[in-house]
Amino acid sequence: MFKQIMPLSLIISMRFFGLFLVLPVISIYALSMPNATPQIVGIIIGGYALTQMIFQIPFGAMSDMLGRKGTIITGLLLFAIGSIVAAIATDLLTLLLGRLLQGAGAIGAVVSAMIGDLVKEEQRPKAMAMMGGSIAMSFALAMVLGPVLGSGFGVPALFWIVAFIALASIVVLVTMVPDAPKVTHTYHNVSAFNYLKNKNLHIMNITNFLQKGLMTFAFMIIPIILTKTFGWDMSDLWKIYIPAMIAGIFAMGPAAILAEKKGKYKEVLIVGVIFFAISYFIMGDARNESFFLAGIILFFIGFNMHEPIMQSLTMKYARVHEKGKVLGTSNSFGYLGTFLGGFIGGIYFQEVDGSFNASLGEIATALIIVSIIWVILLAMLPNPLKTKIIYHNLDDLDENKFNTLDERKAIEEWYINNSENIIVIKYNEQLIEEPTILSLIKK
């Protein structure tokens, strides 16, 4: 599993590193350009998320039909082109265009779906945790290097670095990542949009939307408050981002164990939202620097509790042939939240009497109310049932009998992995046993 997943984890973490590298400093950089306003800055911060939102589902569906690798290469090329445009930008509109092109390379769902293709479901939580850990490490590294390199060489230099990283990722994909197995599924008579009826996926989509929206707004206000209110230099921002990220990483492990090993997905998500609410309650009163810094740390704890399990849990509610579309839809909601977090934040986060503190307090109150509603919604989400999986060679089975599996309610899903010449059957072990299932389809 390690050899299969590490190259993909490297690709997605390098891509996120590219996005995170400019995140701590882009609000200050954009605000320094001619005719800049908080509204325009908010759009530039979240602009890449608008095109991410638009292209996630088409990229996911394209990867389901045409293959994962070609789709990922297309996305990485768009990401590189957008980074170059942002690097040469001297005005707000060109910078926005670069951000929009960066977002058009919407490959996050495709990479996650490819991991799901390459790894057995029992190993998928570990694979997703590995990917989440690599993203967290890239996040921590970006929080250090972004402010330091940005202040030393300028923010355009960061975008040139990002373009190089995107092109290097293509080399990793072509040379190190194996092809996904070819799979035959059994849902040809089901509507391509049947997954949209799944209420559990609706809740996960809303969760992704709110989580990413709160994250974007946090990265908009944190640099501005620290530099404008408390007099920090841009090069000093890593001094809070790193402790906050370390605290988040320590929270990530127990959260993943509780969710994946103990089946407490819903409970972990709810606790994460509570951390969000408390963090904004504390940051809302930005007159006290120590309290504001504590709020940042609590926010990172809540955010990192969610990150390792979000996509793994979403895939548990999806069928094998729908992974690309399901994750694409989920990511679209997430990036819509990212865009609106910056856009709406820019509208309401205004300077009042020489300070942003008054408007921040009002926004924080609204976000606390949203968090309470969010917790109520998550309380309705069922934890996924534990299922067992059969992997059996096709040679001693009668393929004409496979359709009888559809008649058994205890069997959640089955499909054929043509690359490995096996049938894969997911079933509820409390309702049926493996020998009984195999007896139904033996020659």
Image (spheres, rainbow, N blue to C red):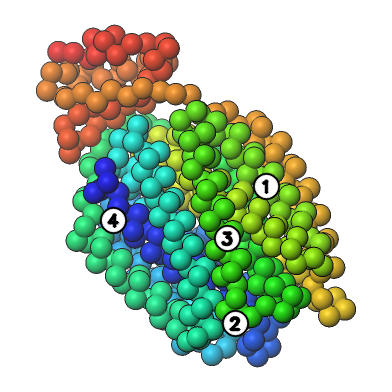
Front residue of 302/291: it is 291
Q: Secondary structure at mark 3?
A: helix
Pointer 2 local density, CA inside 10 Å: few below 14, some 14–19, many at least 20: some
Contact, CB < 8 Å: mark 2 with mark 3?
A: no
Mark 4 is on which residue type? Pro
User: Does 385 sit left or right of 362 as displayed?
Assistant: left
Give the amino acid type for the residue marked by disc 3 in the picture: Pro
Q: Earlier in the sequence, mark 2 or mark 4?
A: 4
Q: Report if residue 314 is visible in the image.
A: no
Q: Earlier in the sequence, mark 1 or mark 2?
A: 2
**Image x and y of residue 174, in percent:** 22, 61
Please state which of the two labelled residues, at mark 2 or mark 3, is closer to the viewer: 3
Image position, residue 76 (x, y; %) = 35, 67
Q: CA distance from mark 3 to mark 4?
A: 28 Å
The answer to whether 243 appears left or right of 430 in the picture is right
- Quarter-wise, where is residue 269 in the image? top right
Residue at (56, 70) in percent of width and height: 238
Q: Quadrant of the C terminus?
A: top left
Marks 3 and 4: which is nearer the front?
3
Q: Decide: few, some or many residues near mark 4? Use Cα within 10 Å; few <14, some 14-19, many ≥20.
A: some
Name which of mark 2 and mark 3 comes first in the sequence. Answer: 2
Report the Cα–Cα distance between label 1 and label 2: 29 Å
Q: Pick the residue in front: 329 or 367.
A: 367
* Tags 3 and 4 touching, CB below 8 Å: no
**Which residue does the numbered mark 1 point to in the structure image?**
275
Of the numbered discs 1 and 3, the one sitting upstream in the chain is: 3
Which tag, 1 or 4, sits closer to the chain's start? 4
Spatial CA span between label 1 and label 3:
16 Å
The residues tagged by marks 2 and 3 sit, at their Cα atoms, a distance apart of 24 Å
Distance from the alpha carbon under mark 1 to that under mark 4: 33 Å
In depth, the one of 354 and 66 nearer the eye is 354
Query: According to the image, label 4 marks what residue?
Result: 7
